[in-house]
Amino acid sequence: MDKTQLETMDSFMVLSILNEKLRLECDSLSTLISQFELDTQWLIASMSQIGYQYDAISNQFKPIPCQSV
């Protein structure tokens, strides 16, 4: 997984790749970030833009829950 390729890919493809890496290779978000030398700010912002956030309990990106007003 190349950082530059990820930055130019569709965000939902990136989401899919990240969740696969978390499921099969990395036991935490910090491991994923350091193993693949990803930019934390970019990663969190990219996933947030499509409505996803990291869930440490399940070790995957999940949809951000809607808050009722």
Image (spheres, rainbow, N blue to C red):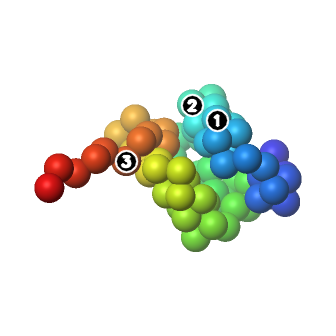
Single out the residue that lies furthest toward the bottom: 41
The residue located at (81%, 56%) in the rendering is 8
Q: Work out whether 26 lies above or below 29.
A: above
Residue 53 lies, in percent from the top left, at 44, 51
Residue 29 lies, in percent from the top left, at 53, 51
Residue 32 lies, in percent from the top left, at 62, 50
Q: Work out whether 63 lies above or below 7.
A: above
Q: Work out whether 18 lies above or below 53.
A: above
Local packing at callout 1 (Cα closer than 10 Å; few below 14, some 14-19, many 20+) is few
* Residue that carries the numbered disc 2 in the rendered image: 23
Q: CA distance from mark 2 to mark 1?
A: 11 Å
* Residue that carries the numbered disc 3 in the rendered image: 64
Q: CA distance from mark 3 to mark 2?
A: 19 Å
Instruction: Tell me the SS state at disc 1.
Output: helix
* Residue that carries the numbered disc 1 in the rendered image: 16
Instruction: Tell me the SS state at disc 3.
Output: loop
Single out the residue that lies furthest toward the front: 69
The residue located at (47%, 48%) in the rendering is 52
Q: Does the image show residue 50?
A: yes
